[in-house]
């Protein structure tokens, strides 16, 4: 295998190159861990919102069942308020989903720029780790 820039024969230079590569890998691993923590917290927030949406749907259904027996302006107002809250949550969910997609694309572009020779040979969502196997960059 030929290389455009042959490696130097000096052992000290080779050691320095190896140490800088190891430092770069540690930094990237730290970035991956930080991104994974962000993903985990976002997933927890989404799960919480999903639970609240389900709770509101059940509460609205219960209030509607109660409404059939007697008309009550108070129940109508409660239903309207809950429906507005539900609509607000669903709108927020859609907005977060579109932001997440844009953020994911920007993150990938920054990552690809930081290791162009490796990542261009791989699929869009993977990058090699030091052992040579592929790992997911963006969840």
Image: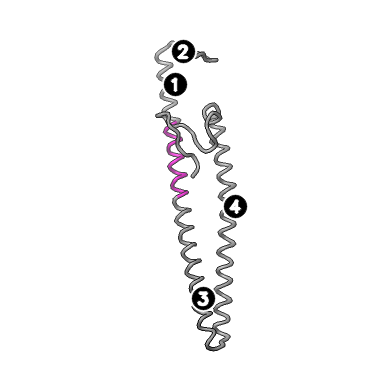
Judged left or right of residue 54, residue 81 is right
User: Sequence order check: which comes first, mark 1 or mark 4?
Assistant: 1
Image location of residue 112, percent across then percent down: 55, 34
Residue labelled with disc 4: 98
Determine the CA span between mark 3 and mark 4. Answer: 30 Å
**Magenta span contains residue 35:** yes
Q: Which residues are magenta?
A: 25-39
Mark 3 vs mark 2: give the one in front.
Answer: 3
**Magenta span contains residue 41:** no
The residue at 45%/34% (across/down) is 134
Residue labelled with disc 3: 61
Judged left or right of residue 69, residue 11 is left
Image location of residue 28, percent across then percent down: 46, 35
Q: Main secondary structure of the magenta part?
A: helix
CB atoms at circles 3 and 1 under 8 Å apart? no
User: Sequence order check: which comes first, mark 3 or mark 4?
Assistant: 3
User: Sequence order check: which comes first, mark 3 or mark 2?
Assistant: 2
Determine the CA span between mark 3 and mark 1. Answer: 66 Å
Determine the CA span between mark 1 and mark 2. Answer: 10 Å
- Determine the secondary structure under disc 2: loop
- Disc 3: CA contacts within 10 A as few (<14), some (14-19) or many (>=20): few
In this view, which residue lies farthest toward the bottom?
Answer: 70
Q: Is residue 63 above or below residue 71?
A: above
The residue at 51%/79% (across/down) is 63
Residue labelled with disc 1: 17
Residue labelled with disc 2: 8
- Determine the secondary structure under disc 3: helix
Judging from the image, the colouring scheme is one colour
């Amino acid at each position: 295998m030929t290389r455009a820039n042959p490696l130097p024969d000096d052992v000290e230079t080779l050691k320095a190159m190896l140490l800088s590569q190891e430092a770069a890998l540690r930094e990237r691993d730290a970035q991956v861990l930080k991104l994974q923590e962000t993903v985990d917290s976002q997933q927890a927030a989404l799960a919480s919102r999903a639970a609240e949406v389900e709770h509101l749907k059940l509460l609205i259904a219960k209030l509607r069942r109660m409404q059939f027996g007697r008309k009550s302006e108070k129940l109508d107002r409660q239903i309207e308020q809950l429906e507005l809250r539900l609509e607000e949550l669903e709108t927020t969910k859609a907005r977060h989903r579109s932001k997440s997609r844009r953020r994911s694309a920007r993150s990938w572009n920054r990552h690809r720029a930081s290791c162009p020779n490796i990542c261009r040979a791989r699929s869009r969502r993977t990058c090699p780790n030091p052992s040579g196997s592929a790992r997911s960059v963006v969840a």
